[in-house]
Structures are given as structure tokens and as C-alpha cells.
Image (cartoon, rainbow, N blue to C red):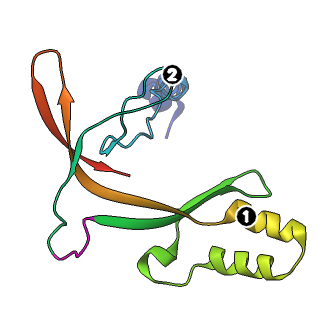
Amino acid sequence: MSLDTLKRSNSLDKLLNAVKEDNAPQEKKSYVDERLWKPELDQSGNGYAVIRFLPSPEGEELPWAKVWNHAFQGPTGQWYIENSLTTIGQKDPVSEYNSKLWNSGVESDKELARKQKRKLQYFSNIRTKVKSCCSDMVKRYLTK
């Protein structure tokens, strides 16, 4: 490719525009799951709602699902946030490691196991009755 061809292709302008686009402010991502419902809280931190549990999905016995998860900050400062494999009936390496820490008998190991322990959440399909300025609306949500 000759120098004249490079000059005519105007690649420097393309590169500069690409750099400007990369440096332009970007929209912040929202990590809020709009499918999950939480009651609105008053000033004292109390919430009130009338909900109705919907029937269990086809093929399921219970109208809710149990999900075990881990969320902790590791020694390097990075976060580990994952569902535990025990949710689906498999062995979970984090839970096994925590068992080894706990059974070591060392208090610092037990403290680390407490920080890394799995947490239980329940999810269910519900229906809420929401008052709006004009009418009552019924909304369907997945709640935890």
C-alpha cells in the first residue's frame, strides 16, 4: 500500500473517531432484576403489601424454589458471587472447602468459613395488588 493510498483512505480520522467513541461517557448498567418485587418501605423501614401466591408451575410440586448461593470477597479483593451447586443436588467445592476449614478447629479458619457460607433464598411467583392514582392494578412478579 502506497503512502498516497494511506493519505486518501483517511485512516487517521477513523482512528481518532474510534478513540473518541471509546472515551465517551457510557450509560451505567443497572443490575436490578425488574422481575423481582420488593415492597415499598415507609420512613421507619416498614413495608406492607397484599400478595397472593400463584399455583406452582407445571411439573413442580411446590410453588417456590430454594436457591443456595455464595457471595464473599476473596483474599485478592475480588468478589465471588455464584449459586451453589447444592441447589441442583451436586457437590459444591466452596461448601466442601468451608467444611475443611470448619473441621480444622482453628478459630481463624472457622471465621473464614462463616464469611464464605452459603445463603438460602426462596423465589416464588406472586400476584400483588397495587393502588395507583387512577385505578387498582394487579401485577405479577417473581419475588424472593
Seen in the image, is 34 located left or right of residue 137? right
Residue range highlighted in magenta: 59-63
* Gap in angstroms between the C-alphas marked 2 and 1: 43 Å
Query: Number of callouts in the render?
Result: 2
> Crowding near pointer 2: few (<14 within 10 Å), some, many (20+)?
few
Q: Is residue 63 above or below residue 99?
A: above
Residue 61 in picture, x, y percent from top left: 23, 76
Q: Which residue in the structure is indicated by mark 2?
A: 24
Residue 62 in picture, x, y percent from top left: 26, 71
Which-is-in-front pick, marks 2 and 1? 1
Q: Is residue 71 above or below residue 50?
A: below
**Prevailing secondary structure of the magenta residues:** loop
N-terminal label among 2 and 1: 2
Q: Is residue 89 above or below residue 57?
A: below
Residue 116 in which image quadrant: bottom right
Residue 130 in which image quadrant: top left
In the picture, the disc for residue 114 is 1
Q: Is residue 115 magenta?
A: no
Q: Residue at x 44, y 66 (%)?
A: 67
Q: Residue at x 29, y 45 (%)?
A: 35
Q: Is residue 60 magenta?
A: yes
Q: Nearer the viewer, residue 98 or 6?
A: 98
Seen in the image, is 81 located left or right of residue 102? left
Seen in the image, is 61 located left or right of residue 107? left
Q: Residue at x 84, y 70 (%)?
A: 109
Q: Residue at x 35, y 58 (%)?
A: 123
Q: Amino acid at mark 1?
A: Arg
Furthest toward the top, the residue is 133
